[in-house]
Amino acid sequence: MRSERPCGTGLLTQVVSVPNMRTLLLLLFTPWLFARSPLPVPEKAGHAVMDHDLMDVTVSQLHELYRLHRYKVTHVVQWHLDRITRYNGIYRAVQTIRAKDALIEAEREDAEAKRPGFMPGPLWGVPIVIKANTSVKGVITTDGWRGFMLPGHELVAPRDATIVAKLRAAGAIIIGVTNMPDFAASDTNRSTAFGRTGNAYDVRFSPGGSSGGTVTAVTSNFAVLGNGTDTGNSIRMPVATGNLVGIFPTRGLVSVAGIAPLDWQLDNTGPIARDVADAAIALTVMSGEDSLDAATAGSQAKTLGGAYTQYLKSGALKGQRFAVPAFILDGDAPAFQGFCPNGTPAQFAEAKEKSRTPLNPETRTAFLRAVEELRAAGATVLFDPDILPNSFADAGAHVCTLPYIREGFDRFLTDFGPAEYHSAVEYEHAVGKPLPHVIIGGGDSEDSVVPKIQQATLETDPQAEVTLLRPRRELLAMYEAELDRLHLDGFIYPATQMPPVDETMPQDGGLSGGPHSATGWVNMIGVPAISFPAGFYDNGLPFGIEISTRKWHDGEMIGWAYDYELHTHHRQPPVLVEHGLLPTAAQPPAP
């Protein structure tokens, strides 16, 4: 079995330097400088030289290479495409490769760089990937499901999702669309559209879901960064398995318009990157108000303003106070999408038991090591069984979104569906089969113990207050009251409840659907959270931690993760293999 850049430990121990803020802001917000004598442009640069320059390259480092004329954008895009060609057959991270379009866009950017007074955007010349539920004009929005790929009935995006338009406007080049589980409804990354994605650190193991395709692509250097979506943990959990940084922004900071919803009352989108600085740059680009997403109305006035790179400061953790939610350590968690008021006490008890996810002893040990690193950086971390106890998870279980599933997907199809269908009813008429209940509701849900919940329109439903709105306000009030009571800046906890699982072996008597987390409550109340690398398990697989804080304090949160990154340098790229360990793992499931 051949491997890429082998080393004795099985992990590449390379630390990429982090530029200081003065340099970063200069590169981001000043015109391109051509006065310096250019280095030779490597039309046929040796693989070793390019690998050295581009492996784990950051946005600021890449822009410096461009400024020095060391590479053209076409060189960099082709290098990333070559890596996809070389490894994607094993890891199955990228579902749709936009090689031709990406190179055309790269050539256009190379040409515009020659114009007098050229000023690059903050992501100019940066190869990125987009998750398969996010609309890219002219590309099939598979949402991980083969039903949107039926010949003659493909869900071809008529325009870009809002964040895709913003990323393009900033100069990013989309080189591919990443694999995801059907409808984002899984904690692992197996889809009927493209099969299984493997973990870059060991292809036998799960990368987590539902943003596992983006995670494997970014950590494997198929792209510099990408977007993920998150309905219950789907940015924050998989980045922890992939040694990456993922941001769940305050809900309303970033538009989700153009993203196929799993549950529009819980969905969010944010950046996935290899370091905090790149995630901060991407979040700055992605954020902003959007008339197509009502949740973003007024968001500009609620933030502190400016680029999120302004929070990248050494010493940000010093004097900060955090606490660990007791219910997470106890393995408790609210039921995904909640428990609706029409359920019985017996059904509530069943839902509570189904949502329990015990904290693995290895994960607990890794988390305690990370806590000591936070303390060494100057933070206070509190443990107490009364800090967000199990009653918080019980309250979260009453935030029920299930009656409003169909409304969200119909809204998406109205604005971003193909000409043939703009609603679930029109899809069924065109194709002859209905959309699955997981995205339009009304049927038996794998996660719900209450069958066939009747669908309603949130804005006109007389039961909306008791079903969703009041329980959500009450849960947020509990969260904020605990921050106030203990004078906390945020909460810290494991981003997963267990290590990545080996998908070649049965887990609990069946095919694994994990790894799992206990962090879906973040989606219920819409507070910001960030997940970032915090070391490795003994078997070499990554471990990550998560911090959440008050709404609209995304910047301070990013600063804490950045300071932890400076103190620890846990990011290490994976060693990829060219021959698969699972000959049939990459095949899509049988119909």
Image (cartoon, rainbow, N blue to C red):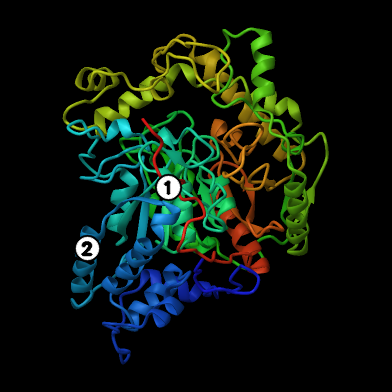
Quarter in which the C terminus is drawn: top left
Discs 1/2, front: 1
Residue 528 versus residue 519: which sits nearer the camera? 519
Q: Which residue is mark 2?
A: 105
Q: Which three-letter amino acid code belongs to the residue tagged 2? A: Glu
Label 1 crowd (10 A; few <14 / some 14-19 / many >=20): some
Residue 457 vs residue 419: left or right? Answer: right
Q: Which residue is mark 1?
A: 586
Residue 64 vs residue 16: left or right? Answer: left
Where's residue 273, x and y in %? 48, 58
Q: Which three-letter amino acid code belongs to the residue tagged 1? A: Ala
Q: Quadrant of the rendered structure where residue 523 is?
A: top right
Where's residue 310, x and y in %? 51, 63
Where's residue 116, x and y in %? 19, 78
Asked if residue 364 can be seen in this view, the reply is: yes
Residue 579 versus residue 226: which sits nearer the camera? 579
Asked if residue 26 can be seen in this view, the reply is: no
